[in-house]
Amino acid sequence: MRTGYLYHEIFGWHDTGTYTGDLPSDPGAGLQPFINYEHADTKRRIHELIVVSGLIDHLDRISPREASEEELMRVHTKEHIERIKKESSSRLGGDGGDLSTPFARGGYQIAALAAGGAIEMMDAVISGKVTNGYALIRPPGHHAVRETGMGYCIFSNLAVAVMAAKERYGKDFRVAVIDWDVHHGNGTESIFLDDPTVLTISLHQDRLYPHETGDLTTLGRDGSNINVPLPPGTGKGGYRYAMTEVVLPALERFKPDLIAVASGFDSSVFDPLGRMLLTAEGYREITEMLMESAARLCNSRLMATHEGGYNATYSPFCGLFVLQQLSGVKRLDDPFNHADQYPGHELKAHEKDVVDRAAQLIADIKV
Ligand code: ZN
């Protein structure tokens, strides 16, 4: 088994500017300038831990390339691509589209490299160059819709990769996208809502972001979308239950050719934006479950693209644990594993209720 890994230092040069966490600084409102939560360090430090732990020696490096305009246009409108390109060439850069997704000069090239990185990783897994893999790319992608970027995302990296795979391997190539970022994968959902060959399942904190999407009632064509809007405070027990009752049986029914993960570490217990309790061990467990599913259903083809995760000291361990599980090589324990003992990890009744309702949607997946 070989595990692919993709990162490029220039992903750390995507400049999201001075912010007050997730809001633009505003002295009049008392918002003191600080960093943007979507900061290079939360990803760069994942990469550094993978190098320093020695895990890097057990991974197959995959190189990113810029996605072409033609590849981006299979997902995004020409107007969106042209606008990002134009603002990227201006002295001060621009914004993904919601005035909360700032990028500096040259942002287009870095965003195109992130999308192209997703394409290359997905292709490496499908072609059998590697068994599974993780693309640690930035900016993230799962909130971007066809016409615009939003929520730190400029292009839908994973959707661009799925469309590239379909171009190469046929339009019937079936991909299941499992989104474990704490925020709803609204972009991926909207792009594939009418495409029954792409199953999208999002496990997220109910109405965290976007506030108006991610409900149980958004159903894709032929049952190809399932949302699991988990209550704040969901821990390992709730996620485990969502996996065994919704994700794994849905995969079993859908029979994908590839399982892709939109991987955010903002569902972790220490994240400043989310209010969930997942730990590095929790992420490892759900990775293991998906690996077992991939082994049964699609020749172990499993890949992830990086999305959110905003705790710069803890995200690295979540990333390390996912990659240790994917590769089967263990280098380090989680020094923060006291969080595995926090009360609240057990499945709670109001979590079970949501998962049980989501599980009823599995029968709608057309086979
Ligand atoms: Zn997120």
Image (cartoon, rainbow, N blue to C red):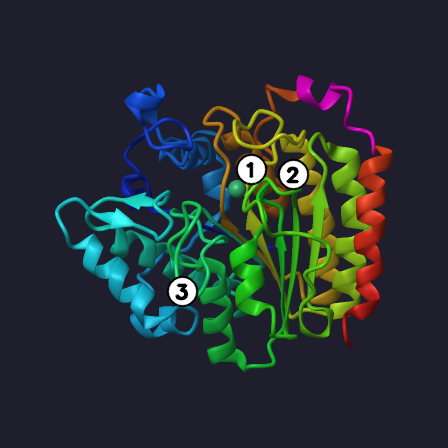
The residue carrying mark 1 is: 265
Nearer mark to the viewer, of 1 and 3? 3
Counting from the top left corner in percent of width and height, residue 256 is at 68, 69
Residue 292, magenta (yes or no): no
Can residue 146 be spotted in the picture? Answer: yes
Q: Amino acid at mark 3?
A: Glu
Kindly indicate whether the residue at mark 3 contacts the one at mark 1 (C-beta within 8 angstroms).
no
Q: Label 2, secondary structure: give it.
A: helix
Q: Residues within 10 Å of mark 1 (few under 14, many from 20)?
A: many
What secondary structure is the magenta-colored segment mainly? loop
Q: Which residues are magenta?
A: 338-347
Kindly indicate whether the residue at mark 2 contacts the one at mark 1 (C-beta within 8 angstroms).
yes
Q: Disc 1 and disc 3: Cα gap in Å? A: 26 Å
* Outermost residue to the left: 91
The residue carrying mark 2 is: 283
Residue 344, magenta (yes or no): yes
Q: Amino acid at mark 1?
A: Phe
Q: Residues within 10 Å of mark 2 (few under 14, many from 20)?
A: many
Give above or below for 112 relative to 341.
below
For the C terminus, the image quarter is bottom right
Nearer mark to the viewer, of 1 and 2? 1
Counting from the top left corner in percent of width and height, residue 127 is at 52, 70
The residue carrying mark 3 is: 147
